[in-house]
Amino acid sequence: ADKMFGLSYEMLDIVNYSQQKNVLFDVGVADSLSKRLVSKILLTTVPDDNSIHLRCFESTHELLLEQLSQHKLDMILSDCPVDSSQSPGLFSKKLGECKMSFFSSSVVDSQDFPAILKNKKLLIPGRRTAMGRNVMHWFERHAITPNILGEFDDAALMKAFALYHQDAIFLAPTIYFDEAKGEVSLCLVSEVEELKEEYYVIFAERMIQHPAVKNVCDADFSDLFR
C-alpha cells in the first residue's frame, strides 16, 4: 500500500511537470550554506533553452527532509548527508567540500591565532547546523572558551552582520576571501584545516527521477570546490 501511494505521488509530479511549458523544479536549500556556491550548483540544473521553473525554499536540514519525504520537494542541498535508516527512501551524494577560515572586516594580527579568538567577539554558525556543532567541538579540542557575539543559522546574514560590526571575527568558507575581493574590505585571520563545510544533494528514490536532479548527481564539481 505504501508503494502504491508513493507511486501515485510520483505520477502526480510527472503530470505537474508535463502541464507547464517550463519544467517545475522545487529545491530545498539548507540556510547555513554559502549562497554563491549553491547558486553555482543550481546552474547545472538549467537547460540550454532555460526551460525550467526553479523554486527554492530555505530552511533547516530536518524540516527540508520532512518536505522531501512528503513529495513537496524534488531535491535538497544540505551540509550533511541523510541517514537512510532513519529516512527510508531518501539518499544523498556528496558534491564536494571546502575549507573554512576565520575572517574579520578590520585588520587583525593573525600571528596570535588561535589565542586571539579568546579576546575577540566571534560570529559563528548556529549550533543547529553541522558546521556550528563542528566549530564548537573544535573550540573544545583546542581549549578555547569562545567569546561569542552571535550565532547564525543563515550564512548570508552572518556575513552581512560582520560587515557592520567591524571588531568581530566570523567563520566562513575560505573561498569567500576571493569572492569578496573588490566588494568589501576583508582580513583573512587564519584557515582552519580541521574544519570543512560539506555539500550534499539529497533526493528520493523514485521510478522516474526528475531530470534536473540527475544533472546535479552526474555533474563534476571538483573545480568549484578546489
Image: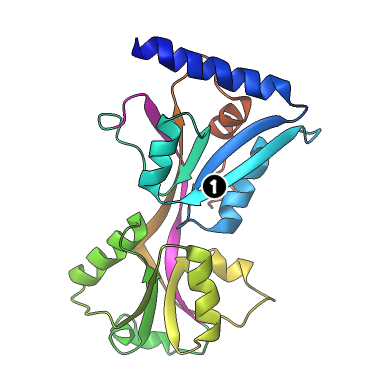
Which x, y percent locates residue 139?
24, 71
**Residue 128 sits above or below residue 17 on the image:** below
Which region of the structure is painted magenta?
Answer: 87-104
Mark 1 lies on residue: 57
Q: Residue at x 54, y 85 (%)?
A: 164
Residue 125 sits in which quadrant?
bottom left
- Across and down, in percent, residue 44 comes to 65, 39
Residue sitting at 55 percent across and 81 percent down? 163
Is 30 colored magenta in this rendering? no
Magenta span contains residue 102: yes
**Would you place residue 58 above or below residue 18 in this image?**
below
Q: Quadrant of residue 87?
A: top left
88 vs 184, nearest the viewer: 88
The image position of residue 70, as x and y in percent, is: 43, 30
Q: Nearer the viewer, residue 178 or 84?
A: 84
Q: Give the secondary structure at mark 1.
A: strand
Residue in the foreground of this view, choosing between 61 and 63: 63
Relative to 21, 73 lies left or right: left
For the residue marked with disc 1, what is the amino acid? Phe
Which residue is nearer to you in this view: 140 or 63? 63
Q: Residue at left 48%, top 40%?
A: 76
In the picture shown, does residue 156 fall above or below 89? below
